[in-house]
Image: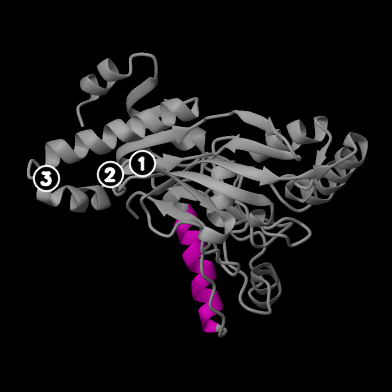
Amino acid sequence: MNFDTLKSQFPDLEIYQNHLLAPYTTLNIGGPADIFINTKTSTEFVNVLKYLSETINFSAHSDPKVASTAKIELSSDITILGNGSNVLISDSGIRGIVVKNSANNIEFLPNNQIKVDSGVLLPRLLQVTTDHSLSGLEEFAYIPASVGGAIFGNIHGVNKNNFDKFIVSVEALDLNDVNYKLMNHSDIQWDYDYSSFQPNRNLIIVSATLQLSPGVPENSQKIINDIVTQKTTTQSMNSVGCVFKNPPGDSAGRIIDQELNLKGFQIGDVQISPKHANFILNIGNATASDYLSVIKKVQSEAKSKGFLLEPEIKFLGEF
């Protein structure tokens, strides 16, 4: 994809070459993207993806018989970035095109429903719905994810409810045929053990309709404040959240702390949190290489004692 062609096609968008990705992640780690595009509305987000899909396929394959194959391969050339809260980006960055989804619209519908862009950040969504006397999402306080990330990972709150409990439908762009798909909750195969929303990697979440309940702003705000107060004592925002999946019937944090005694372990500026052992922090100018070394240290020590710890974060770029 030619940078100048992209700039001329979308003159009003933020489009950069060799653009550092670290500032777009909660870890503040990551090298440059070959091309970085920041979209601020769902219309921009969808238009860019449609254009990239059609252009990449056309330039790569002139034979229409292989167009579907080309579209299946497309998602390996395009990386979608939300709030960058559950990813480790390599020091060499990401090849191809990174599209940041900053779409931020929240629409209030009848019957206590809302339609929300996938780029909306959860802290803003909680504040806006609380201010509009809507309740239900308070348990997701202090989670720095976007709505798209929350849906994709089907995250759970402090009450152990998964995010899909509130989903009526999801609107996604299917890169196989560059069309919208509106999927009701029952149309989606939800994985309640470990994340997955997408039936295939070519569905890009654009928006979702959520079902909430009538609430009292003061009550909702107290719940949110209490959760934030409790979480800030153990969880740091300069992290990716929990790094490892909890083994069945156990806790990764407990294993790292009590079985491996690795709380506070450090390589370079990467440190296993002294407060919560399943959080690995950037305490300065950490590199992805050192971060991965800490992950491997934990896995190696765990394996030697009969534990299998699998990362639940996403690795982007070459490692």
Q: Does residue 31 appear left or right of residue 168 in this picture? A: left
In terms of image quadrants, where is residue 276? bottom right
Mark number displayed over residue 179: 1
Residue 285 locus on image (x, y percent): 52, 40
Residue found at x 68% / y 72%: 251
Give the side of residue 256 with respect to residue 33, left or right: right
Q: Which residues are magenta?
A: 291-304
**Residue type at mark 3?**
Pro
The answer, for residue 199, to whether it is visible in the render is yes
Tell me: residue 309, above or below residue 117. Answer: below
Name which quarter of the figure residue 246 lies in: bottom right
Residue type at mark 2 is Asp
- Of mark 3 and mark 2, the one earlier in the sequence is 3
Earlier along the polypeptide chain: callout 1 or callout 3?
3
User: Where is mark 3, residue-wise?
Assistant: 64
Mark 2 or 1: the one toward you:
1
Point out which mark residue 238 bears: none
Query: Which of the pair 152/110 is nearer the observer?
Result: 110
Label 1, label 3: how far apart the Cα atoms are: 18 Å
Q: Mark 2 near mark 1, Cβ–Cβ under 8 Å?
A: no
Percent from the top left, x then y, of residue 112? Answer: 76, 40
Give the Cα distance between marks 3 and 2.
20 Å
**Quarter that holds the C terminus:** bottom left
Furthest residue in direction front, as rendered = 110
Q: Secondary structure at mark 3?
A: helix
Q: Residue at point 50% right, 67% down?
A: 297
